[in-house]
Image (cartoon, rainbow, N blue to C red):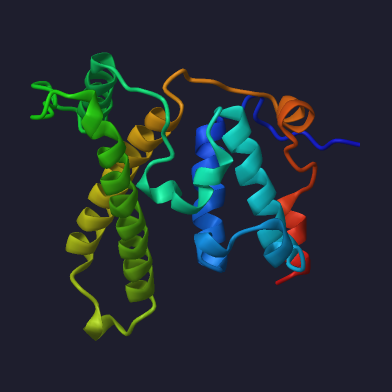
Amino acid sequence: MEIETVYDEFNPAALLLSDYLALCRLGPTPDEWNTLTLSNNPPRYYRFQRIKSCFKALDLNPSLISTFELGPFEKEFIMSDIEKVEQILAEIFSLDHGVYIDERSPNILPGLFEQFFKLYKNLMDLRKTYADLLATPSHFMIPILAKEEVTKNGYILEDAVWNVLVYLLNKEGLTFKRSELIEQFDFPDVELYEIDLEWT
């Protein structure tokens, strides 16, 4: 029997990013990802299958999975896509004057994806560093107010970068029910949480 989550709809771009980042942490490197090399490790194997499913749902070429971080795009962007990215950034940072990208060409957006993806990974590493600091003796810790301010701003920046990445992958705003992902795009009908617990 299928176990539905509390969410009715899933954005395949958000699922793709989440699973890709998780599989990067689990290893091996993306150029070694394939069904054969990952088949003996269910947490890795099923994340890889989910990634392939999301590629299908987003009409992306699965041969680009190994170079995903460079931007898996074969579609063309248009000027309104730049304006949408500017809008996303302005809303997240609550900037009345907006955000303006200097180079007014849709051709920059694949490169922007690559840079924002690197930035997001660095922000995740920074957040982990601050989490580690919480466990250090108090006389080694940075002042608590400064730490909270950096953490708060880091989360805001993370949200902005994440939203831009999701938009660039899925500018049509496609969403699917879990059952639709399973039936139409071979999304694995398993619970990753339970699988991860078994392999912890």
Q: Nearer the viewer, residue 110 or 20?
A: 110
Residue 71 falls left or right of residue 198: left
47 over 180 or under it: above or below: below
* Quadrant assignment for the C terminus: bottom right
Kindly indicate the quadrant of the structure image that contains residue 146: bottom left
Residue 132 x, y percent position in the rendering = 37, 74
Kindly indicate the quadrant of the structure image that contains residue 118: bottom left
Residue 12 x, y percent position in the rendering = 57, 32
Q: Residue furthest right?
A: 1
Residue 198 x, y percent position in the rendering = 78, 67
Residue 48 falls left or right of residue 25: right
Residue 196 can be seen, yes or no? no
Q: Residue at x 73, y 24 (%)?
A: 180
23 over 64 or under it: above or below: below
* Quadrant assignment for the N terminus: top right
Kindly indicate the quadrant of the structure image that contains residue 72: top left
Q: Residue at x 73, y 67 (%)?
A: 41
Please give the count of numbered marks on the rendered protein.
0
Residue 163 can be seen, yes or no? yes
Residue 178 falls left or right of residue 139: right
134 over 2 or under it: above or below: below
Q: Nearer the viewer, residue 30 or 165?
A: 30
Residue 63 x, y percent position in the rendering = 55, 45
Residue 31 falls left or right of residue 133: right
Q: Residue at x 41, y 25 (%)?
A: 75
